[in-house]
Amino acid sequence: DIQMTQSPASLSASLGETVSIECLASEGISNDLAWYQQKSGKSPQLLIYAASRLQDGVPSRFSGSGSGTRYSLKISGMQPEDEADYFCQQSYKYPPTFGAGTKLELK
Amino acid sequence: EIQLQESGPGLVKPSQSLSLTCSVTGYTITSGYDWSWIRKFPGNKMEWMGYISYSGSTNYNPSLKSRISITRDTSKNQFFLQLNSVTTEDTATYYCARAFYVMDAWGQGASVTVSS
């Protein structure tokens, strides 16, 4: 299985701060990478797919980038509603595998 | 708007079978997509378990292949998870989701504890 190493495990950001979360795949995944947001007590929501494509309805402050084995999610201007867990998922090979998650808190 | 809702027992005894139902509204499960089960363990690790496609074919995580079965009832627009011979390691929140390589709609999740 492809291993997804996500970092950091947790971080704290101030209002308006730009935040980055990274995922490193154990092999190249050809941009087949999605990012999800999960707020406390809620179901996960798809934010980004194909590494950089924004899902409909997701605010434009969220962006994704990367290639090969290294991918990142950026939040340009932390908002209170962005406090959540974030995790990545590769869909390049079965079985799909997930990163361990990043807990983002508002400072 | 599509909605998915998991239902089933919250407590299962070791060695027994775990059975969950995912009820889908707002989209017909035979129209497209793969209808998936994913679980999140205490400590937040997530595992893709498998899916049943819109055509009825199935694909399972090899780590579960001997214990898992995903079926459906198209007349009720539901699909089901059965996981056999459960242990305490199967304690998790179980999600159903609509997927086409990525999961674009998820249920709220069903918490299942395996304990005697």
Image (cartoon, coloured by chain):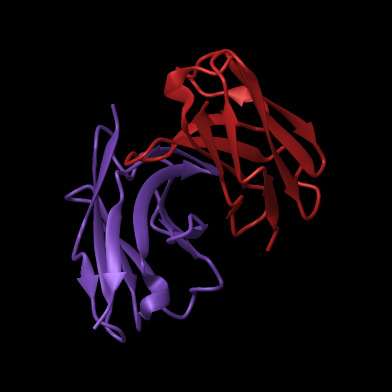
Labels in figure, total: 0
**Percent coordinates x, y for residue A16 in the rendering:** 58, 12
Chain letter, colour red? A
Position above or below: B14 against B32: below
Q: Residue at x 49, y 75 (%)?
A: B65
Residue found at the far bottom of this picture: B15
Residue found at the far front of this picture: A107
Q: Colour of chain B?
A: purple
**Percent coordinates x, y for residue B112 in the rendering:** 28, 64
Position above or below: A16 against A82: above
Task: Tell me where residue A48 sits by quadrant.
Answer: top right
* Viewer-side residue, B67 vs B11: B11
* Viewer-side residue, B42 vs A37: B42
* Viewer-side residue, A75 vs B27: A75
**Residue A56 falls left or right of residue A63:** left
Q: Residue at x 80, y 48 (%)?
A: A28
Q: Residue at x 57, y 31 (%)?
A: A12
Image quadrant holding the N terminus of chain A, namely bottom right
**Residue A33 falls left or right of residue B78:** right
Task: Tell me where residue A72 sits by quadrant.
Answer: top right
Q: Residue at x 35, y 84 (%)?
A: B85
**Percent coordinates x, y for residue A38 in the rendering:** 44, 38
Position above or below: B39 against A23: below
**Percent coordinates x, y for residue A96 in the rendering:** 59, 54
**Residue B10 falls left or right of residue A13:** left
